[in-house]
Amino acid sequence: MSQVHVSNHPLLRHKVTLMRDFKTEPKKFRELIREVAILLAYEATADLALNEINVVTPLSNAKGSDLKEVIGLVPVLRAGLGMVEGFWEMMPSAEVWHIGLYRDHKTLEPIQYYNRLPVAPSVDVCLILDPMLATGGSASATTQILKDWGAKRIKYVGIIAAPEGIKRLQNDHPDVDIYLAAIDDHLNEQAYIVPGLGDAGDRQFGTG
Ligand code: PRP
Ligand code: URA
């Protein structure tokens, strides 16, 4: 079974609280999602492999490290877009591969509308970026797309999850570890996370 990591870091808790507040405007919301992404990037990459390298300091030689694996950031459109910048600041050589999905309002099933992955996988580890894990349908579908592409190692990085979404992703993909800032109470009748933060896409882009 996969592991679920929920960070208790005070900065994350403070910033997620501001994201939840309905009075937070899109400009501030975008700033917060970028900052939260930086903190989650730190948590989600703690086990990345390293190469040992030598470096010359102004005084001497030193042993050092550089990242061994090619990282692929996979933001799920639209809401995952806001997390890219924060991750990219921490790992500027990461490749970014977008997946476009939206939830059908009636069936709640994810509908794919964008995927330009190349024929063969070009990365060693994929980090799926999507702030909201609600029913888990979108996360599960994105993971399946990446597995069909040939991705070997996949992690999911979200901000707020419902217990239902975690259960679905763990059942469908027990090999995918999950990194979060918070686990909320439940889903409402429209499958929105409660208390949650509303529609993460709308709140970033000023729509809805
Ligand atoms: C949101 C969110 C996830 C999905 C989660 O996207 O960003 O992708 O819902 O719900 P699920 O776990 O029930 O699948 P949405 O479909 O609202 O599209 P948007 O980001 O374009 O607004
Ligand atoms: N998508 C969102 O943006 N918010 C939710 O609460 C659920 C799905």
Image (spheres, rainbow, N blue to C red):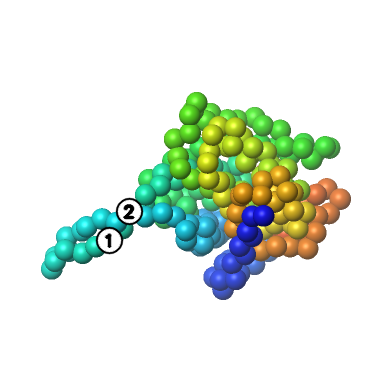
Label 2, on which residue?
51
Q: Nearer the viewer, residue 52 or 70?
A: 52
Label 1, on which residue?
64
Quarter that holds the C terminus: top right
Q: Nearer the viewer, residue 111 or 27?
A: 111
Instruction: Using the image, determine if residue 107 lies above or below residue 116.
Output: below
Residue 32: image location, x then y, percent: 55, 59
Residue 54: image location, x then y, percent: 22, 57
Sequence-wise, which precedes: disc 2 or disc 1?
2
Q: In the image as oriented, which residue stretches furthest toward the front?
A: 1
What residue sits 56% from the left and 50% below the top?
A: 155
Q: Mark 1 vs ligand 1: CB under 8 Å? A: no
Label 1 residue SS: strand
Quarter that holds the N terminus: bottom right
- Whether residue 71 is visible to the viewer of this picture, yes or no, is yes
Q: Nearer the viewer, residue 10 or 19?
A: 10
Residue 135: image location, x then y, percent: 76, 48
